[in-house]
Image (cartoon, grey):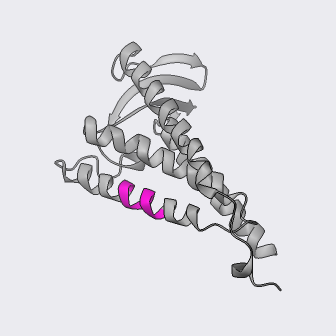
Amino acid sequence: MTDKSAAPPMHKPLRWLWLAAAVIVLDLATKYAASAWLSYARPVEVLPFFNLTLLHNPGAAFSFLAGHPGWQRWFFALIAIGASIGLTIWLRRLRAHEVLLAPALALIIGGALGNLFDRLVHGYVVDFLSFHAAGWYFPAFNVADIGITLGAAGLILESIRDARR
């Protein structure tokens, strides 16, 4: 077994922040379009299992803490800022062999900052992607949430791959 900390550092790991910026731009553009073109809470069917539905979420994932009087806006904003700083430091310290971690961290950073923008500007996160089947609706989400989810999947895959080494 080799010492993984002795591996050489990744060459310019912060270059992956372009991916975070792309997530932010795509997220904000799609949220702007959804807010401009959709009526609040009125689904527009795209496919039999997929609607575009403009919703405002003052909470976190699955509307966690959405019913509270407003303190959660700042709580989740602080979490997003702290996570983005921590993940950027982690990204900067990656080793050459951690090739899946770089885009995974960048996707999470981009998603966190995309939703942070909404929290700071609107006081809620704009969601508009809505999947459903047989009367069951998955909570609406947005492009930032997709970035966070794909990034988390990348972290899991990297940890599984790392455990097998």
Q: Is residue 153 visible?
A: no
78 part of magenta stretch: no
Q: Is residue 59 above or below residue 50?
A: below
Which residue ends up furthest to the front in the rendered image?
12
Q: Quadrant of the C terminus?
A: bottom right
Q: Quadrant of the N terminus?
A: bottom right
Q: On the rendered structure, is 64 left or right of 129?
A: left
Q: Is residue 39 above or below residue 144?
A: above
Residue, far left: 69
Instruction: Specify the principal SS of the magenta part.
Output: helix
Quick check: is 82 in the magenta stretch? yes
| Residue placed most toward the observer, 73 or 13 | 13
Over which residues does the magenta segment extend? 80-86
**Residue at the image position 38 percent from the left and 18 percent from the top:** 42
Query: In the picture provided, is 32 more to the left or to the right than 143?
Result: left
Residue 103, horizontal then vertical, whole percent:
64, 51
Residue sitting at x 73%, y 72%: 8
Image coords of residue 134 (percent x, y): 57, 31
| Residue 47 visible in image | yes
The residue shown at (58%, 54%) is 14
**129 or 135: nearer the eye?**
129
Residue 19 picture quarter: top right
Q: Position of residue 87 (x, y in %)?
A: 50, 61
In depth, the one of 3 and 47 nearer the eye is 3
